[in-house]
């Protein structure tokens, strides 16, 4: 009983930090250079266990992230990377993120197989020796445990300092110094050499769609937008369920985990190779296809097709996942995950769903006076912020803030999701 209480207290403390009160000092110039250290690593395992191993490290010429908000206090994500000053042991940088491998571990396939997938993260390039630590979250108790820990001397010869391919980079929008802006990067996937003009035009169209959507519409000046013109040998993307396979730059495909609409790429290495010389806070992979589908993982990447009739809505929805850490609020569609993806008795880390275990740390402060908890989906409450059952792929036991929202059915972002997006913009653009 004591151990269970202690674990809940630790999770609650994590969500208290999610108030984004900040407090991080500007230690950037003391500890870091305006470059990136990219760490490629492998995640391997199955539903029961996972492990991490270092693959390689690269020095890259751009750091576009914040220089004040170096410590991530949100507790978002299934993984956390931390950087400590080796001499003092002081935590000097941290970030949470998700991976596709984490999702795969919740599938039926992971009950029977062990797999290993390549992943990648970037941190500011250190001026002196640091300790790099990667932790993974255990869904059984929501706590993190260390998976990889390595001391890094920045001058060591084993850090790759070579140039990668110089793809065509286009400024779609430039609002100012990257460290004080959210740098959104579109990557071309399934566009041949002849299709590069179409890609830039598509990226511009998506940019306008984003900034026509609240709350992004009022924060346009906080974004830089870039496009990177990767050239594929063939147009489109893999559609394994139809026997279609294309030779493309990022090896993307539908039917991820057997779901026809789930569009992803498994290997992060070529994705990170593509943005090696571009300021990058958020990645959207734009696929030259008219099929319906997409995918998005927090602080990893989002992906969608260019020419489906629901293209713009899918784009904004998936960016909600990858940029703001928002959960899916639907509960009746086909998913490949088992019922333990959001287990009973534990509060999900995502800001827009709750099991009511620690609801006071979610959107309780946004409820109108007298709102019943849970909230019945009656006409009186439709259009109001409440606590409606159904979300996170579960019809029972998980709750969402509104009957309709971008994260459920492509309606406008609800106030809870909008607040999470604004907080993330403020954090990444160093406003708080």
Image (cartoon, helix red, strand yellow):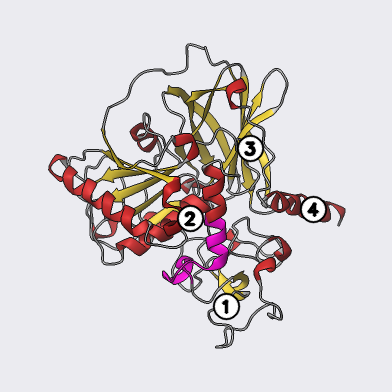
Q: Which class describes the residues within 10 Å of circle 2: few (<14), some (14-19), or many (20+)?
A: many
Closer to the eye: label 1 or 2? 1
User: In this view of the protein, can residue 234 be seen by the observer?
Assistant: no
**Front residue of this view, candidates 269 and 313:** 313
Q: Which mark is first along the chain, 1 or 3?
A: 3
Residue at the far bottom: name it. 379
Q: Which mark is first along the chain, 3 or 4?
A: 4
Q: Which residues are magenta?
A: 405-421
Q: Which residue is the site of mark 2?
A: 321
Q: Position of residue 392 (x, y in %)?
A: 55, 65
Q: Which class describes the residues within 10 Å of circle 4: few (<14), some (14-19), or many (20+)?
A: few
User: Do the CB atoms of the residues marked 3 and 1 lie less than 8 Å apart?
Assistant: no
Q: Give the left or right position of residue 89, taking residue 111 as reference.
A: right
Q: Which residue is the site of mark 4?
A: 9
Q: Give the left or right position of residue 94, taking residue 23 as reference.
A: left
Q: Which class describes the residues within 10 Å of circle 3: few (<14), some (14-19), or many (20+)?
A: some
Residue 71 has which mark? Answer: 3
Q: Which residue is the site of mark 1?
A: 384
Q: Position of residue 429 (x, y in %)?
A: 51, 42
Quick check: 142 above or below 72? Answer: below
Closer to the eye: label 4 or 3? 3
C-alpha distance separating marks 3 and 1: 34 Å
Q: Quadrant of residue 346?
A: bottom right
SS class of the residue under badge 1?
loop
């Amino acid at each position: 009983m004591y151990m269970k209480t202690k674990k809940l207290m630790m999770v609650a403390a994590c969500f208290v930090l999610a108030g984004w009160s900040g407090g991080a000092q500007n230690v950037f110039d003391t500890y870091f250079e305006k470059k990136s250290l990219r760490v490629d690593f492998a995640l391997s395992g199955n539903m029961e266990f996972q492990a991490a191993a270092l693959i390689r490290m690269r020095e890259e010429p751009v750091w576009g992230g914040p220089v004040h908000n170096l410590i991530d206090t949100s507790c978002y994500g299934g993984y956390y990377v931390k950087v400590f000053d080796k001499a003092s042991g002081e935590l000097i940088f941290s970030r949470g993120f998700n991976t596709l491998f984490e999702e795969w571990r919740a599938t039926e396939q992971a009950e029977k197989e062990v797999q290993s997938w390549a992943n990648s993260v970037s941190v500011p390039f250190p001026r002196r020796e640091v300790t790099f630590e990667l932790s993974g979250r255990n869904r059984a108790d929501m706590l993190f445990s260390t998976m990889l820990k390595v001391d890094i001397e920045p001058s060591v010869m084993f850090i790759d300092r070579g140039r990668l391919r110089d793809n065509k980079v286009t400024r779609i929008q430039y609002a100012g110094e990257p460290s004080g802006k959210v740098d959104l990067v579109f990557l071309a996937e399934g566009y041949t050499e002849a299709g590069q003009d179409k890609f830039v035009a598509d990226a511009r169209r998506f940019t306008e769609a984003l900034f026509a959507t609240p709350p992004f519409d009022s924060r346009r000046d906080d974004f830089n937008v870039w496009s990177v013109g990767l050239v594929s040998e063939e147009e489109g993307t893999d559609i394994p369920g139809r026997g279609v396979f294309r030779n493309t730059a990022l090896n993307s495909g539908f039917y991820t985990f057997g779901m026809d609409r789930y569009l992803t790429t498994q290997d992060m290495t070529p994705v990170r190779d593509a943005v090696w010389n571009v300021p990058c806070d958020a990645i959207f992979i734009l696929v030259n296809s008219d099929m319906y589908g997409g995918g998005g993982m927090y602080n990893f990447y989002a992906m969608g097709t260019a020419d489906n009739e629901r293209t713009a809505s899918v784009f904004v929805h998936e960016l909600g996942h990858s940029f703001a850490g928002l959960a899916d609020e639907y509960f009746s569609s086909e998913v490949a995950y088992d019922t333990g993806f959001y287990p009973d008795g534990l509060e999900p880390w995502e800001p827009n769903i709750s099991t009511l275990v620690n609801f006071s740390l979610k959107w309780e402060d946004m409820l109108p006076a007298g709102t019943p908890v849970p909230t019945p989906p009656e006409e009186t409450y439709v259009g109001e912020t409440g606590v409606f059952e159904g979300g996170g792929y579960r019809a029972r036991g998980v709750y969402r803030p509104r009957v309709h929202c971008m994260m459920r059915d492509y309606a406008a972002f609800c106030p809870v999701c909008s607040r999470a997006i604004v907080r993330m913009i403020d954090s990444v653009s160093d406003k708080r």
